[in-house]
Amino acid sequence: MGHPDQSADPTGSGQADTRHAPELIRLQAVLRAARFHGIDLDVRDFADEAGQTVPSIPALARWVEENGGTAQGMRLQWRDLVRLRDVPPVALMFADGSAGLMVGADDTNGVIWLVDPFASPDTPPVAVDELRLEGVWTGDVLLVRGRHDGGRKEDAVNFAWLRRMVLGERVLLRDVVIASMVMSVLAIFPPLIVMQVIDRVVNFHSMSTLVSLTGLVGVMAFYEVLLSYARREITLVMTTRLDTRISLAVFDRLLALPLEFFEREQAGNVIGRVSAIYKVRQFMTGRLLGTFLDMFTLLVVLPFLFWLSTTLACLTVVAAALIGGIILLAMPTVGRLVGRQIRAEMERSGALYETVAGIRTVKTLALEPVRREVWDEKTADVVSASLDAGRMSNWVATAVMPLDLFINRGIILIGAYLAITSTTSGMEAGALMAFMMLGGRVASPLVGMARLIDDLNEVRSALAEAGSVLNRPTETRALTTGLRPPVHGALAFSGVSFTYPGASTPALSDVTFSVPAGTMLGLVGRSGSGKSTITRLLQGVSRSYTGQLRLDGIELREINLTYLRRSCGVVLQDNFLFRGTIRDNIIAGRPGLTLEDVVRAARLAGAEEFIERMPAGFDTWIEEGSTNISGGQRQRLAIARAVISDPRLMILDEATSALDPESEAVVNANLRHLARGRTMVIVSHRLASLVACHQICVMDHGHVVDIGPHEDLLARCDIYRTLWTQQNQPAGGNDGGPPSVSHMHGDAA
């Protein structure tokens, strides 16, 4: 579907829309399947892997899941496909890169029912049999479903969460366990062979027995090498997959945290706490997995040891149990010291991140001695905590060392004594050697279990630190559920009040005003009057306000948060540009857009002119911190990024306050051009840049003092008139009255 030839239209009905490229047809098929479940997708939001010309199934599934649905790619045979009777629309992937939408199946008659993704809803489906489908269908399908757990509380990041992650790889775990069990059985044979060599070959000089045992050793060695390789390979794949699952889950949870959390927490501290989850991952896939696998050896070898010598086996088990007891007794103290060490390391990491992030300030203000003093203090805390934890662990290791030496060396002396003194049931030399070879295999898992419990202290501390960040309330429900109405830009505040967490006074108090769509609204007032708080509420950053805030008549909290933010263009005072090309930064929020869209947005923002002068144009690389472009250029790129999706609502929070007069004049001229047909909310301390606004809202201590055009406010609002006079007072002094309106407009120009 998507080409005029018959292979692109398996229905043979001629319904395939040849005006669309195959990749667009594939996107449309998934879009219609998602719409069946109430999920609205936007093709411009789709982002495939780099270098992919055809939308891949993983990328399509991710596209659906990011918008509140669930999707699963599968490879089916015709006999399985034709049995999918009572299912929602299923996207069938075709070999030419397009797709069809299956809306029904009939296994009795051996047909499925297909519709063209771009066909109108009232177009009847067409029956297709196996012969006509097999030439174009790849066998891949994408099942799309709505998510019915929007109200379910998210799983806490704890040991149960990790266990579910590990059990997600149960197939690989099964293979590892089987390989370990077989290797445990094979582990018995080498000591048995050694016993036979000493007792039979050496004592009786039996060459034929030696030849037989040599062949057996060779065969067993081959299988042991093969099984060892298989177990290591499977374990490597499993740990890699588990690491990927944990990394994706942690990053998704981190992105779902509200902005307010990141504003309250130190960035380096957050990174350090979240990174602690990888210590847990190393424990789960390292010592825990190794000890678990060694337990199979214990279960197989221990009975054999008791068969060789009950006395020596009991001594080995008792010594290993004593080691475990010592470790268990020391565990609370070691755990407390390890937790202190982890916290000290995270605080040092936070200081390092803060220094690197603010290196420009450190250099310009010569703060190196101050930051070095902070680093020295944090390092001293880490050293102190590490020494305390290390010394305690050293005491524990010293206490268990005699028992460990007894298992490895003392047992052979006792066995030799028993062999010499006992005349009836004494051990032969071969049996003693076999016992020593297997004794270490028994003691190692027992000691490993005790040390595993010791490691749980560090893991518990690390998991608690990661959970202190990842278990915070997230915006997941707001990001994936809610209404997606067309946005025109009409705003209405009705009795809106808001208080920041931990604040004693409200940032907004009973704010009430409304503006129609297409209005240029200016927000002015002294610092702390609530201007930026209004813009935060409009972006959905803070949703715990009281009263009613409506966008086009719909309460803002009922609108899907992702949709709301993508429907708004936001330009801040200090905009962050990612390290990458200019083109990548402009389409950061809409990865599916083309170069033509990028050029159009740059032209609207007045950025095309300076971009074309750059050596690589839109492929010019922006360094970290935007050090290779000016402040005005950075602001114009931020405006281009904001307008590329053609938003009906734009928010500019002190977007020009950090610019020089020339750059500010260019940006303001572009903004007036952009304002046509859009609602614009502009926060600015410079009143001259707001003269052209249709309405100007004057804020003071969280209240709306007045709202109206510039001339009306100048005549009736004392606060506005005072601010205007302060900013436009002539250098030679005030002549007793405010400047004329014509003078004001001249300043604004």
Image (cartoon, rainbow, N blue to C red):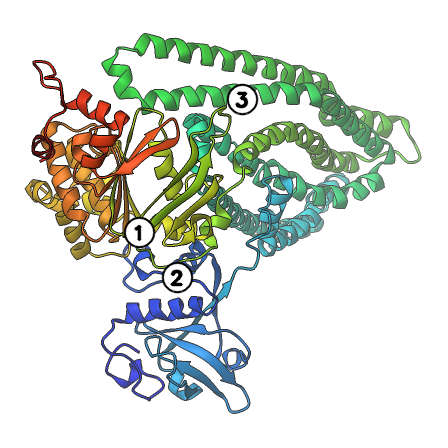
Mark 1 crowdedness (10 Å alpha carbons): few <14, some 14-19, many ≥20: many
Q: Say which label, 2 or 3, has the lower sequence index.
A: 2
**Residue marked by disc 2:** 60
Rendered view: 377 above or below 257: above
What x and y, as percent, mark residue 143? 48, 68
Give the residue displayed 73% in from the left and 36% down from the top: 442
Q: Which quadrant of the rendered structure holds the N terminus?
A: bottom left
Along the line of sight, which residue is nearer the eye, 216 or 256? 256
Instruction: Please rate how many residues cluster around mark 3, counting C-alpha atoms within 10 Å: few if below 14, some from 14 to 19, many from 20.
Output: many
Number of callouts = 3
Percent position (x, y) of residue 145? 50, 65
Spatial separation of the CA atoms under disc 2 and disc 1 = 31 Å
- Residue under the image location 81 percent in, 43 percent down: 303
The reply, left or right, for residue 181 in relation to residue 617 is right
Q: SS of the residue at dot 3?
A: helix
Q: Is residue 375 left or right of residue 526?
A: right
Which three-letter amino acid code belongs to the residue tagged 1?
A: Gly
Query: Which image quarter: residue 735?
Result: top left
Q: Which residue is mark 1?
A: 489
Q: Nearer the viewer, mark 3 or mark 1?
A: 1
Foreground label between 2 and 1: 1
Secondary structure type for disc 1: loop
Chain-order first, disc 3 or disc 1: 3
Amino acid at pointer 3: Arg
**According to the image, label 3 marks what residue?**
343
Give the alpha-carbon distance from disc 2 to disc 3, as whole Å.
41 Å
Labelled disc at residue 106: none
- Say whether disc 2 or disc 1 marks the residue closer to the N-terminus: 2
